[in-house]
Image (tube, helix red, strand yellow):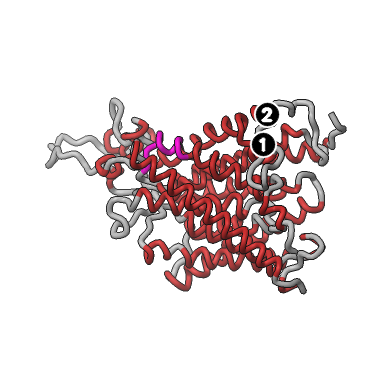
């Protein structure tokens, strides 16, 4: 095995763990935004993606994405099963197997991102089938197009950490699935409010934390590119939080915690493809634009009547498009490479044109294939739960579980229903007066949450 760079190896090991953490973070982020009766189903779709995609990546996914090249479209199967990689090292000084593991985490979260568009109405088994088919037919080849020696990368399209391969890819598929499954019962008349905003904020915090591995880890080493990516990721995200909540302030009169969390994700998405190619001032500008535009685009689903439950299209597809295209305006030649200066830094229109080509190609391919896969599943085994299960709660129908138990176990009565332990219950004097009614109180679960 070639001599390894221990510093680079340690950094990519750490980054891989950070990116994996993002998927449970996404589960919390998405789970908090759903109704209380479907939170487990929502979180299970993220954990299910970890299971399915991890195995397919070993079987053939990595090989399709990064082994050889066939016509610029796909890799070969020489690395299927990750065979032949145990004793090999890369030119960057890290083991091939570590590179495969790092890229696996990207594949996992890309698939998991799609699930937010179909919250509150999807069966779990068909979702797993879709996850496996979409990863095989879309993510693995597109990763090859962008990073594995395929046609998009060879044309000179810049995507440092996943604007096209991850976010536009997932966002287009999310739109397709939302159209296939149709609107939730009662949407848009009923308001589907998040049932647990602290959970949303916790999920956003974990995503933000893990994103440093996502972006800075894509440098492949602990070097200057990683440092640029780290600072740009931070300042763009901070700017996007402000951009989103300022839009809310003017439009709705109040800034919200959900808006701050969503703005953070929009900023993280927007800076992902550009993080190593911009100076910090450019990253701040990108973040402000991404936060404000994504906030405005949330309303498009009401205008065009597609039920994207958790705004995957407005945040991930739109944010990915913004980040990818703004490279053509804001790229700094000393960072992006010779001839890759953005329009605002003295460059020509060629880079912007290439970025637009990459955006359109990935968006169109992902949307069409996801729509076909989703439609076939819906027409054969069924993708959507019954209206009764949707209204009563998918968690019980699909998993025979409930996230929150408000009943009693041998005492506690109303205190248990309200989440108060007997030891914390207020004390009062006993009375011999009979109560006026023996009717049970309305369950707390019907008063709060989704």
Judge from the rendering whether residue 132 lies leftward or rightward of residue 340; answer left or right.
Answer: left
Which residue is identified by label 1?
76
Residue 210 x/y as whole percent? 63, 45
Mark number, residue 126: none
Query: Quarter of the image holding residue 441?
Result: top left
Quadrant including the N terminus: top right
The residue most toward the right is 3
102 or 426: nearer the viewer: 102
Which SS class for mark 1? Answer: loop
Mark with earlier residue (2, 1): 1
410 or 179: nearer the viewer: 179
Q: Give the magenta range.
A: 122-130
Q: Decide: is 426 above or below 326.
A: above
Residue 430 x/y as whole percent? 23, 35
The residue at 70%/42% (across/down) is 69
Query: Quarter of the image holding residue 66?
Result: top right
Query: Quarter of the image holding residue 422?
Result: top left
Which residue is identified by label 2?
82
Residue 246 visible in the snapshot: yes
The residue at 60%/29% (across/down) is 59
């Amino acid at each position: 095995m070639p001599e390894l760079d221990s510093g680079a190896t340690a950094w990519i090991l750490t980054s891989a763990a950070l990116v994996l953490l993002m998927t449970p973070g996404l589960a919390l982020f998405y789970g908090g935004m759903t109704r209380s009766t479907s939170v487990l189903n929502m979180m299970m779709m993220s954990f299910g993606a970890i299971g399915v995609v991890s195995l397919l990546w070993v079987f053939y996914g990595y090989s399709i994405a990064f082994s050889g090249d066939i016509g610029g479209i796909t890799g070969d199967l020489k690395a299927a099963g990750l065979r032949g990689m145990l004793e090999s090292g890369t030119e960057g000084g890290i083991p091939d197997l570590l590179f495969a593991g790092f890229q696996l985490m990207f594949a996992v979260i890309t698939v998991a991102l799609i699930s937010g568009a179909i919250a509150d109405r999807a069966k779990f088994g068909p979702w797993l089938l879709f996850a496996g088919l979409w990863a095989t037919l879309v993510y693995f080849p597109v990763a090859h197009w962008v990073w594995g020696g395929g046609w998009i990368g060879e044309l000179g399209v810049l995507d440092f950490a996943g604007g096209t391969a991850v976010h536009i890819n997932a966002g287009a598929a999310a739109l397709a699935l939302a159209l296939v499954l149709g609107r939730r019962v009662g949407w848009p008349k009923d308001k589907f409010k998040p049932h647990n905003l602290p959970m949303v904020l916790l999920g956003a915090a974990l995503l933000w934390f893990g994103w440093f591995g996502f972006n800075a880890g894509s440098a492949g080493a602990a070097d200057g590119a990683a440092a640029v990516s780290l600072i740009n990721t931070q300042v763009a995200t901070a700017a996007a939080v402000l951009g989103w909540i300022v839009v809310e302030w003017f439009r709705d009169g109040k800034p919200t915690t959900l808006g701050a969390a969503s703005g953070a994700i929009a900023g993280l998405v927007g800076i992902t493809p550009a993080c190593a190619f911009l100076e910090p001032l450019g990253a701040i500008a990108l973040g402000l634009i991404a936060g404000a535009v994504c906030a405005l685009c949330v309303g498009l689903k009401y205008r065009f009547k597609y039920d994207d439950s958790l705004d995957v299209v407005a945040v991930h597809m739109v944010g990915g498009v913004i980040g990818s295209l703004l490279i053509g305006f804001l790229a700094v030649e000393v960072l992006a490479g010779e001839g890759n200066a953005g329009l605002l830094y003295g460059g020509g229109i060629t880079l912007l044109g290439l970025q637009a080509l990459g955006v359109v190609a990935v968006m169109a391919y992902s949307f069409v294939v996801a729509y076909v896969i989703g439609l076939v599943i819906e027409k054969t085994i069924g993708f959507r739960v019954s209206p009764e299960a949707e209204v009563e709660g998918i968690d019980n129908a699909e998993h025979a579980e409930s996230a929150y138990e408000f009943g009693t176990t041998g005492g506690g009565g109303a205190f248990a229903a309200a989440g108060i332990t007997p030891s914390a219950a207020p004390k009062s004097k006993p009375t011999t007066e009979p109560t006026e009614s023996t009717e049970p109180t309305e369950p707390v679960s019907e008063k709060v949450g989704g």
